[in-house]
Amino acid sequence: IYRTKYHLNNELSEGLISATNKKTLKTGYVNAKQKVIIDFMFEDGKPFSEGLAPVKQDGKWGYIDKQGNLVIPFMFDDAFGFSNGIAKVEITINGINRPAIIDRSGNFIIEPNELYNTIDICEDIILINN
């Protein structure tokens, strides 16, 4: 029986899998052979999409590239994968998580706003519900 030192958090995405070290409970990324590619240093991590992955550190989400370099700073209360160069993020305003849309540089395409309850990205369409 082969026992892994990691808990695999999701499916293989762009050649990497978010995994949690069972001993330290920190998250990093391994390849399909479970070789560590990005060290276990994050509180949480989501799948890669368009070369970037949302990762959590000190309670905030940011984005890393496949080498583990921080590309978009830890500043969001939640973060999701990229699609067509944009991603949904959430920022807390007056105690409520409000959605926003960013580009691959972390610039807001749609800023968080108290009027927006939900924002969804469906292929090339951004749906806003207020």
Image (cartoon, rainbow, N blue to C red):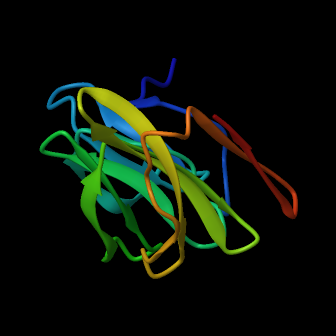
Which residue in the rendered view is the most extreme toward the top? 1
Q: Is residue 130 left or right of residue 24?
A: right
Q: Nearer the viewer, residue 99 or 39?
A: 99
On screen, residue 29 versus residue 12, left or right, reads: left
**Residue 5 visible:** no
From the image, which quarter does the C terminus lie in?
top right
Query: Looking at the image, which is closer to me, 123 or 39?
Result: 123
For the point 28% across and 39% down, which residue is it?
93
The answer to whether residue 18 is above or below residue 68 is above
Asked whether residue 91 is in view, the answer is: yes
Q: Name the spot of residue 66 as percent of width and height, x first.
A: 47, 72
Q: Position of residue 17 (x, y in %)?
A: 54, 47
Name which residue lies at 23% across and 32% down: 94
From the viewer's side, name the closer residue of 39 and 35.
Answer: 39
Total number of numbered labels? 0
- 39 is higher (above) or lower (below) than 68: above
Residue 59 screen position, x and y as percent: 18, 39
Displayed quadrant of residue 91: top left
Residue drawn at (76%, 71%) of the image: 84
Residue 28, given in percent of the width and then of the height, sits at 34, 50
Q: Residue at 55% of width from left, 40% of height from top?
A: 116
The vertical placement of 93 against 48, above or below, is: above
